Amino acid sequence: MTKNPKIDKATLVAFSVDEIGDNHLFTTVETPMKADAFKMTDHEKKEKIAFHFTEIMEVLGLDLTDDSLKGTPQRVAKMYVDEIFCGLNPANKPKVALFDNKYQYNQMLVEKNITFYSNCEHHFVPIYGKIHVAYVSKGKVIGLSKINRIVQYFAQRPQVQERLTMQIALELQEILQTEDIAVIVDAKHLCVSSRGIKDDASATVTNYFGGVFQKSDKVNELLQLIKN
Ligand SMILES: [Zn+2]
């Protein structure tokens, strides 16, 4: 259940494309990015994506002179760059101000049922669900809405659920300067429910339990709190 942040990268990258197939394995905790990922401006990216999306639609045989279809490549390009994949760009990372823990509240704080929408990096169809985040302050606290923003930032990338879970946890550990972070992601994958195996009933749960959350009494307390 517990994820170790110090995952051996050598074992993670040892999958081939064929092995990954529909199995939703992931290779690195960091989103794999090219060195020149942000050489192009957002405007240039949108023009290029619209061009290539036009090609995809034409290959599929769609008539792009139809009024309903002709704006689609531009809409998709804008949506990719400005919305659903804007979390790829570190410039869009939320700025987080920390506050002193004035009330000396040293119990766990749980932000539960954070709704998120992401996209599976293997099929580019939605992953969506709820995320629960808990931490125990080591002296600093974070504004509650910032936890939501951090979740959204990492969700707005092509993702795999395990990596999303870890990226949120590691970021919060870094910001709050504590190991004591728990992240639980309960999600539906449209690539599992709307295609492939077409299982609409199943959900996938991943979690990261750091620091005090590795103790079973803390985990039980947390699970109790998010149950209702
Ligand atoms: Zn998928």
Image (cartoon, helix red, strand yellow):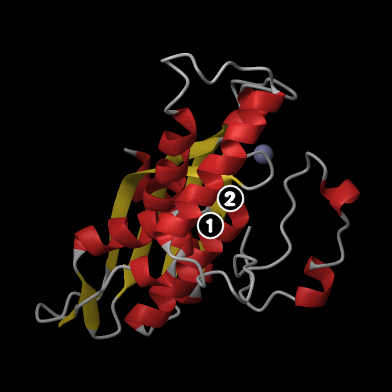
Give residue 188's quadrant in the image. top right
| Image-based side of 4 in relation to 65, left or right | right
Looking at this rendering, what residue extends furthest in the front direction?
A: 65
Which residue is at 71% across, 26% downward?
Answer: 59
Label 1 crowd (10 A; few <14 / some 14-19 / many >=20): many
| Image-based side of 22 in relation to 144, left or right | right
Q: Find residue 20 and name its label.
A: none
- Mark 1 near mark 2, Cβ–Cβ under 8 Å? yes
* Camera-side residue of 73 and 182: 73
Which residue is at 85% across, 52% downward?
Answer: 17
Whether residue 84 is visible here, answered yes or no, is: yes
Label 2 crowd (10 A; few <14 / some 14-19 / many >=20): many
Residue 54, percent from left and from top: 58, 33
Give residue 6's quadrant in the image. bottom right
Q: Find residue 164 and name its label.
A: 1
| Image-based side of 203 in relation to 128, left or right | right
* Camera-side residue of 149 and 110: 149
Ligand 1: does it lie within 8 Å of the C-beta at label 2?
no
Q: Secondary structure at mark 1?
A: helix
Ligand 1 occupies quarter: top right
Position of the N terminus, as image quadrant, is bottom right
Residue 193, percent from left and from top: 62, 24
Under mark 2, the amino acid is: Gln
Residue 87, percent from left and from top: 43, 59
Residue 53, percent from left and from top: 58, 37
* Disc 2 target residue: 161
Q: Is residue 191 above or below residue 67?
A: below
Which residue is at 19% across, 67% downward?
Answer: 143
